[in-house]
Amino acid sequence: MNEKVVFKTDSRHLEVDDDIVTIKEKQKGTLSIRFRSPDKSKIEEIMEFFESLTDMEPLTMNIADTGEIKAYFRGTGPLDTIKEDDKIIYTFEATIQELQELIK
C-alpha cells in the first residue's frame, strides 16, 4: 500500500502516491518537490494544482500522515520527459518555502 503526500490550500487539495515524489532541500526551508511518473495524466493533474497557485500562497504538505508542514508556494518548473528503459517518464517540479515559526 502506497503512502500519500497531501497538499492543501484554503480551496483545493491534492493527494499523490509517495513513490512518485522526491523532496530535496535546496536551501534552508526551501523545498524542491519533484514528481515522476509514466502516467502523463497524473503529472498533468499535479501541474494543474500547482499552476493554479499564486506566488506566496499558503499551503500545507502532509507526508504519510506525519503532520502538516506549513509552507508558501514559490513556483514551478516545466513538464519534462526522461527516457528510462524504453519508457517515457514525465517529470514536474514545484518549489515551496517552509513557514518558519519565530521562537521568542
Image (cartoon, helix red, strand yellow):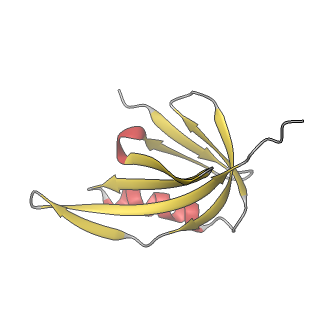
Question: Residue 70: image x %, image y %?
Answer: 70, 44
- Most distant residue in the right direction: 104
Question: Residue 83: image x %, image y %?
Answer: 17, 64
Residue 35 lies, with reference to residue 79, above or below; the image says above
Residue 73 lies, with reference to residue 100, above or below; the image says below
Q: How many marks?
A: 0
Left or right of 69: which side holds 35? left
Task: Name the residue rendered at 46%, 47% in the picture.
Answer: 23
Left or right of 85: which side holds 61? right
Quadrant the N terminus occupies:
top left
> Looking at the rendering, which quadrant does residue 50 occupy?
bottom right
Task: Name the residue rendered at 57%, 27% in the picture.
Answer: 66
Quadrant the C terminus occupies:
top right
Residue 67 lies, with reference to residue 30, above or below; the image says above
Is 99 in front, or is 40?
99
Task: Name the residue rendered at 84%, 36% in the picture.
Answer: 103
> Looking at the rendering, which quadrant does residue 95 occupy?
bottom right
Residue 84 lies, with reference to residue 59, above or below; the image says below
Left or right of 14: which side holds 20? left
Question: Residue 7: image x %, image y %?
Answer: 59, 46
